Image (cartoon, helix red, strand yellow):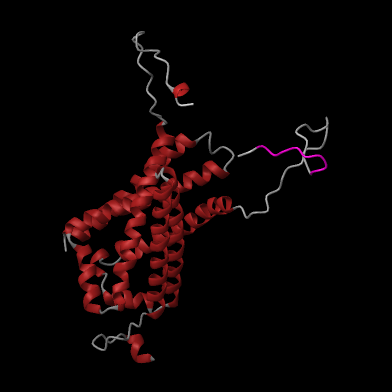
């Protein structure tokens, strides 16, 4: 870092402003990612309260709780566009919310530049895998693929 | 430069121990600590949970075998802990939103923390009765 040389006729900004010169706030033209991230955590958090609590109630509380969950249970839920949309929203919001949270934790505790960089690369790779696999599963799942299980909604089609 | 950074040998002979530098932030700090721990825990479960659910695309037999692992008593207790972490993270998240957006949020942040604790118990007691009954009496 070398101090800028003062050359005659060059565009050199004087260090001292004249008294009472209006304060000019330098406006950043970059998008304010940290602000958007901060807001996203709060908005997605509120949505996730509804989505996750609903998910837990339907899958763990009502009916037989954990014992009702099997392939047929998932098939029944994902035959409905309502639960497909529910789970897709939950998947994306939870994964992005969690990724941003873990990103903050990595930034806080990983002190070496290289460690921080590679931990975040691993985090983003895991995020892409979960989002791609999860989205594909929700959209490509065919509950009528197994002929041994005859669901009512399969014969109708 | 390096020599000037050597600390002066003060405090050694006077018998004074340096004051503790551990930050003790009471409710505000502990809610922050618990929010981090619960958040990271939920993150790792989400990763596993998306992958175990993805086995529905392999075959019904594989999915049922995988999901049956969640039905033994040890995993049942793990699920209770996981739901406890989710409920705390959700309620403390609401507290954070109130601290950020409600003009009296910072003033009441300690009371809000104890409110989180009370609502956590109010939700967890009925849930645990229901869930542990499902897990242990099937």
- Is A9 magenta? The answer is yes
Main SS type for the magenta part?
loop
Q: Is residue A66 above or below residue A112?
A: below
Q: Nearer the viewer, residue A70 or A2?
A: A2
- Is B1 magenta? The answer is no
Relative to A142, A35 lies left or right: right
Say which residue appears at 55% left-offset and 52% top-offset: A39
Give how far across and how far down residue B126 sits, in percent.
30, 52
Give how far across and how far down residue A37 sits, in percent.
53, 53
Relative to B102, A120 lies left or right: left
Q: Is residue A106 visible?
A: yes
Q: Nearer the viewer, residue A126 or B13?
A: B13
Say which residue appears at 77% left-offset and 31% top-offset: A16
Count of marks placed on residues: 0
Q: Nearer the viewer, residue A16 or A44?
A: A16
Give how far across and how far down residue A129 sits, in percent.
39, 67
Q: Nearer the viewer, residue A124 or B117?
A: A124
- Taking the view exactly as shown, the residue that stands out farthest to the top is B14
Quadrant of residue B56 in the image?
bottom left
Q: Quadrant of the C terminus of chain B?
A: bottom left
Q: Is residue B118 visible?
A: no
Give how far across and how far down residue A128 sits, in percent.
42, 66
Say which residue appears at 22% left-offset and 61% top-offset: B134
Q: Is residue A103 above or below residue A151?
A: above
Q: Magenta stretch?
A: A3-10
């Amino acid at each position: 870092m070398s101090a800028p040389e003062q050359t005659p006729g060059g565009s050199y900004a004087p260090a001292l402003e004249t008294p009472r010169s209006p304060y000019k706030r330098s406006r950043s033209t970059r998008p304010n990612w940290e602000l958007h991230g901060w807001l996203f955590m709060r908005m997605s958090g509120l949505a996730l309260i509804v989505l996750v609590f609903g998910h837990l109630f339907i899958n763990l509380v009502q009916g037989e709780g954990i014992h009702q969950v099997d392939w047929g249970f998932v098939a029944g839920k994902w035959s409905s566009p309502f639960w497909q949309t529910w789970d897709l929203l939950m998947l994306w919001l939870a994964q992005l919310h969690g990724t941003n949270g873990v990103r903050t934790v990595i930034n806080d505790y990983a002190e070496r530049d290289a460690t921080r960089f590679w931990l975040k690369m691993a985090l983003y790779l895991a995020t892409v895998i979960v989002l791609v696999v999860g989205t594909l599963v929700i959209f490509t799942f065919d509950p009528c693929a197994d002929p041994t299980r005859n669901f009512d909604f399969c014969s109708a089609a | 430069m390096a020599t000037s950074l050597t600390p002066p040998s003060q405090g050694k002979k006077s018998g004074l121990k340096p004051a503790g530098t551990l930050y003790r932030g009471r409710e505000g700090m502990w809610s922050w600590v618990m929010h981090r721990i619960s958040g990271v825990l939920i993150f790792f479960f989400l990763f596993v949970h998306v992958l175990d659910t993805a086995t529905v695309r392999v075959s019904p037999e594989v999915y049922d075998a995988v999901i049956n692992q969640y039905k033994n008593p040890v995993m049942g207790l793990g699920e209770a802990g996981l739901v406890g972490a989710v409920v705390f993270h959700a309620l403390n998240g609401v507290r954070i939103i109130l601290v950020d957006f409600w003009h009296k949020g910072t003033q009441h942040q300690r009371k809000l923390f104890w409110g989180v604790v009370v609502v956590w118990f109010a939700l967890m007691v009925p849930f645990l009765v229901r869930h542990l009954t499902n897990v242990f009496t099937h």
